[in-house]
Amino acid sequence: MMKVKVYITLRESVLDPQGSAVRTSLHALTYNEVQDVRIGKYMELTLSKTEEDVDARIKEMCEKLLANTVIEDYRYEIEEVVSS
Amino acid sequence: MKFACIVFPGSNCDVDMFHAIRDELGEEVEYVWHDEANLDRFDAILLPGGFSYGDYLRSGAIARFSNVMDAVIKAANEGKPVLGVCNGFQVLLEAGLLPGAMRRNQNLKFICRPVTLVVENNETMFTTGYELGEEITIPVAHGEGNYYCDEATLKSLKDNKQIIFTYKNNPNGSISNIAGIKNEKGNVIGMMPHPERAVDQLIGSNDGLLLFKSILRNWREAHVLNV
């Protein structure tokens, strides 16, 4: 089995109103060193072993459904899970 | 003229849309559940607002892959009028029938109130009943109506006169004050404001009714002789 960790964030060029609100709130708590906050999504997919090209399959999943590439970027990590 | 009112799990403006067509416009309309695969018997397709599939993942992202969407895309390719309102607009964006995407409203609030729209293009099958530049009052009700597209897309929207409605006073941060757009061909339109909630003076405005009347009139001119 494999665990895939998918991270989705708004593209750099897209304003993140939620992130700005959280930054303002952090500043109110005197964490003035916080320059920017970007809010995104984190997903964990558990995959069964497959003969197919895992990278290509995950990219497809991200671009078809998990991320909207008009406004979002995605990246992912694949971990082998040793089943006992 | 026969309208399809598409119902996804979580749609909640379907009844208003149905009422607007049957009782105010006086035409035939049928609810169509999201797993139906054939829309050939309809002349126009309506995607109402709501929170399809709970808006999980992103607004419209899951609805876009429901069975009925292949039929909606087919109808769009055949040139039938397709209107997406609010969540319906978001579904059309996710399906790639219209360009761009929606972000959270700039002020992070769910905005629910009547707004003033400016008619930017009255030469579409949805807007011939309006005057160019006319100001109309139609309610919005959304948390994610902050339209976004890149510079190149915005330029092509402007060049092809695809921007149909703009907000007079932008409520949500939408790029270029965009409230509604059409596809290049002109038969698919998406808008955040709810014309189906503005079909009777009794509830504040009937400015939305002209949109449905425009669809009907243009369809009759194209399909029915001796009108």
Image: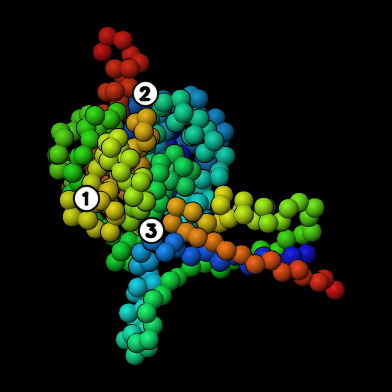
| Residue pointed to by mark 2 | B1
| Residue pointed to by mark 1 | B167
Question: Which of pointers 1 and 3 lies earlier in the amino acid sequence?
Answer: 3
At mark 2, the secondary structure is loop
Q: Distance between the residues labelled 1 and 3?
A: 16 Å
Residue B132 falls left or right of residue A17:
left
At mark 1, the secondary structure is strand
Q: Report the amino acid beneath label 3.
A: Arg
Chain ID at mark 3: B
Q: Can the viewer see residue B8? A: no
Q: Which of marks 2 and 1 is in front?
A: 1
Residue B190 falls left or right of residue B122:
right
Q: How far apart are marks 2 and 1 (CA)?
A: 30 Å
Return the x and y of residue B176 as percentages of the image width and height: 25, 51
Residue at the location (67% across, 52% down)? A56
Q: In front here: B187 or B112? A: B187
Q: Outermost residue toward the right?
A: A84
Q: In this view, does B8 lie above or below A55?
A: above
Residue at the location (70% across, 64% down)? A46
Question: Which of pointers 2 and 3 lies earlier in the amino acid sequence?
Answer: 2
Task: Quadrant for the C terminus of chain B, please.
Answer: top left
| Residue pointed to by mark 3 | B103
Res B92 quadrant in image:
top left
Return the x and y of residue A52 as percentages of the image width and height: 76, 51
Q: In front here: A29 or B176? A: B176
Q: Is residue B127 above or below residue B190?
A: above
Q: Report the amino acid beneath label 1.
A: Tyr
